[in-house]
Amino acid sequence: STMPPLLSAIANAGRHGVLAKSAVVMERLGRIDTVALDKTGTLTEGTPRVTDVRPLPGTDLDEDALLALAAAAERPSEHPLARAVVDAARERGLPLPDAVGFSSVPGAGVTATVRGRTVQVGSPARLSTTSAEEPHHGPVADLESAGRTAVTVLRDGAVVGVLGIADRPRPDARATVAALTRLTGRAPVLLTGDNERAARHLAAEVGITDVRAGLLPEDKVAAVRGWEAEGLKVLVVGDGVNDAPALAAAHCGIAMGRAGSDLALETADAVVVRDELATVPAVVRLSRTARRLVV
Ligand code: ADP
Ligand code: MG
């Protein structure tokens, strides 16, 4: 073809199911030597399911009431965990009360007013105290040890229950980690806002040993900036609002398209439109070939 190599590379990436936003992106992708992967929605399928509903003893809530309360607050959120909670409530046929004044904090959770009371759903570490004396400590530790993501539900500031949520690794996650390791000479790093135990559980399943857990969006950015300051060229792959700042800070950012948040899709340099993680090492390989043809 008479097309310049980087433009042909864009076309080839498109055939592989990756939309690169410019020729510069293909050039940059060919230079990356370090890969950081998000967990939920990136290494995992992003369709987590509620496995456990545990009202704390002593509250007036049974399982259904706890789930309905959490789902009411989560309904406006586009986070995969929020969808899991809302779907679980729908499957039980629970009517959801109206929620007003919704807000969310990436990497932490959501807040809304339900029936005049403030309801929060999210990370036990970010929303509540995690001291061993707290009544939710036991259920949270049990669920996390089993590889689940535990989220606490608070009403007017007090924890009223814990939900356990489980997500499967993508079928091509392990092969993708292996391919990226071969391409860069070092294993990818897992960057996640989730808890350390769930993160290590998932990492072991896909062949990752370097795990940075409990990160806020700005912590993901700090990790990327740290590597870049050492002269490394980092590729970040993510899907969430919480990944957007890291996608922007990296040498190159790729967003997972199907479940990806609008902010991640807008911020990333390239988008995986065919929902397969294995397209990521494929386009890195393409970009390297294209660069060799240019220089
Ligand atoms: P990841 O980096 O794995 O994609 P996030 O940064 O999106 O994870 O979320 C980190 C943690 O914050 C979750 O494990 C959960 O505890 C909490 N969280 C964030 N958003 C929500 C939400 N909408 N509902 C419940 N928990 C949430
Ligand atoms: Mg994510």
Image (spheres, rainbow, N blue to C red):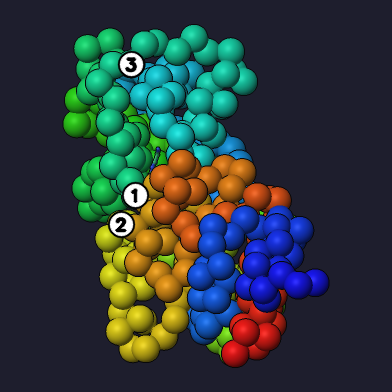
Task: Please tell me which residue lies in front, 24 or 62.
Answer: 24
Task: State the residue at coordinates (52%, 80%).
Answer: 32
Q: Callout 3: few (<14), some (14-19), or many (20+) C-alpha neighbours within 10 Å?
A: many
Residue under label 3: 99
Compared with residue 180, is residue 231 higher up or lower down, i.e. above or below? below
Task: State the residue at coordinates (70%, 51%).
Answer: 274
Amino acid beneath label 2: Leu
Residue under label 1: 107
**Residue 216: mark:** 2
In the picture, which quadrant includes the N terminus?
Answer: bottom right
Task: State the residue at coordinates (62%, 56%).
Answer: 19
Amino acid beneath label 3: Ala
Q: CA distance from mark 2 to mark 1?
A: 5 Å
Secondary element at image label 3? strand
Rendered location of residue 189, percent (x, y): 49, 74
Q: Are discs 2 and 1 less than 8 Å apart at CB?
A: yes
Tell whether circle 2 marks a residue whose Cβ is less than 8 angstroms from ligand 1: yes
